[in-house]
Image (tube, helix red, strand yellow):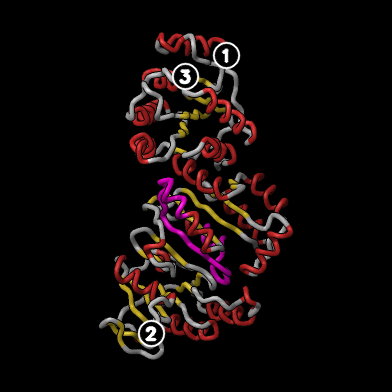
Amino acid sequence: MNLKRLFKPETMAVVGVSLSNESNPANVVYNKNRLRYPVQVFAVNGKGGTIRGETLYRKVQDIPAKIDLVIVATKAEIVPSVISDCIEADAGGAVIISGGFAETGYMDLQNQLVSIAKESNFPIIGPNCLGIFSPSHMDTFFIPGERLLIPDRGRVAMVSQSGGILVDHMIKCAAEGVGMSLAVSIGNKAVIKELDLLRYFKDDPDTDVITFYLEGFDENEGRKFVVAASECGKPVIVLKSGKTPGGTSAVKSHTASIAGDYEVFSSIMAQYGVVEAKDEFEMVAFAEALSCYQRSIEGKVAIITGSGGHGALATDACFLHGLSVPVLSQSAQAELRSIVSPTIRDISSFVNPIDLTGSAIDDDFMAVVRSVSRNDDIECIIVLLLPYLPRITMDLSAQLSLLYQQEGKPIVAYVPHVDKYKMLVEGFMLNKIPVADSIEDAIHMAEAMRRYKSC
């Protein structure tokens, strides 16, 4: 199936727009896209009429333009006939927001939908989903725009069986400055499934990292997905639910999916180098890290900080996540001692974690990071940069970013994300250095590279 018109439409029809209920999902989608996005939007309702001076078409075939994408938000029982209309009008694909299919026991109705779509090779997202969000281009979510926190355009694609989880991840991405290429909620995934989307994003020039929230697969589908993910050439991150008996039951009632044997699936993902995120926090941190560094490491990290406590917490977190914090050789420690300022030379610890103390200045951090960047025993540097250290400047993050560009060893940073320290955060972010708002997330970012196995 060709998904280009579905994901990069120039025209959109919204079926189910109401003349009496402005909070109807179809109206929310129609109004939002008509007013805020460049896609040309047409409203459809079987009764016809006008809405705010615009024609309300009775059928998709009546629209005097070739339609790329149709959003369907009508009663479930009439959705098959609407899809037949879309096919007759040569539309490019459809998003079915409507629920009332397999997830509520109406399997026959969903099977009828699948039969119509497959006979004409017609791509459908859903049913029972939010659909597609494309920054600056379109938004099929039936959520008022003012309630969404929207990420900037970027290079991370997100696919989710749950619309709510997808929106939650988008909010976290927006807060963390992680840019998005496309977000797709697939709901019951009756026609377009994860494997189809993986193949699309593999060749999508706008996407570098692909993430999935999965609830379950049909028989043999999971293995095909993992194999394809391992061969796609881009990092694929998976967050899976249905890990426990209770979670498995919840998955079935949500999208009628069969969660499958989680332990087996998790083991296969690790075997094939697919990056499994254990929870929602890892998911966003992993996406940020792998959008900056698409490389794998064994897990040997150096921790550089101005606070011994932060260094100790970070070291604990590294060991808990399977990363190692190698003790630096005596010669390496002696070199570090020789290149820092006399003020901190005798009060710092250079073992690893490297604690430069609260008296360190920019030049101390720069000298130590440069030296560690050239140490073959270290694969990744975690810099815990505390903005309240009195002798560092707000320019230090930009200086460290330039150092990374010169030396090439991955740097992961921690800076508290508050307005007062925005300049430090942006100094990393604008130069494609992943910057976490907690020590734990900084460790997650290094862990992402350990779990990723590049082809």
Tag shown at residue 375 = none
Q: Residue at x 59, y 40 (%)?
A: 451
- Residue type (three-letter) at the residue carrying disc 1: Ser
| Mark 2 or mark 1, earlier in chain | 2
What separation in Å lies between label 3 and label 1 (alpha carbons)?
Answer: 20 Å
Is 81 left, or right, of 15 in this rendering?
right
In this view, the mark in front (2 or 1): 2
Secondary element under disc 2, as helix, strand or loop, is loop
Tag shown at residue 357 = 3
Is 217 left, or right, of 344 in this rendering?
right
Q: Position of residue 66 (x, y in %)?
A: 34, 77
- Residue type (three-letter) at the residue carrying disc 3: Thr
- Residue type (three-letter) at the residue carrying disc 2: Ser
Q: Residue at x 65, y 66 (%)?
A: 257
Q: Position of residue 171 (x, y in %)?
A: 45, 54
Residue in front for this viewpoint, 216 or 452 = 216
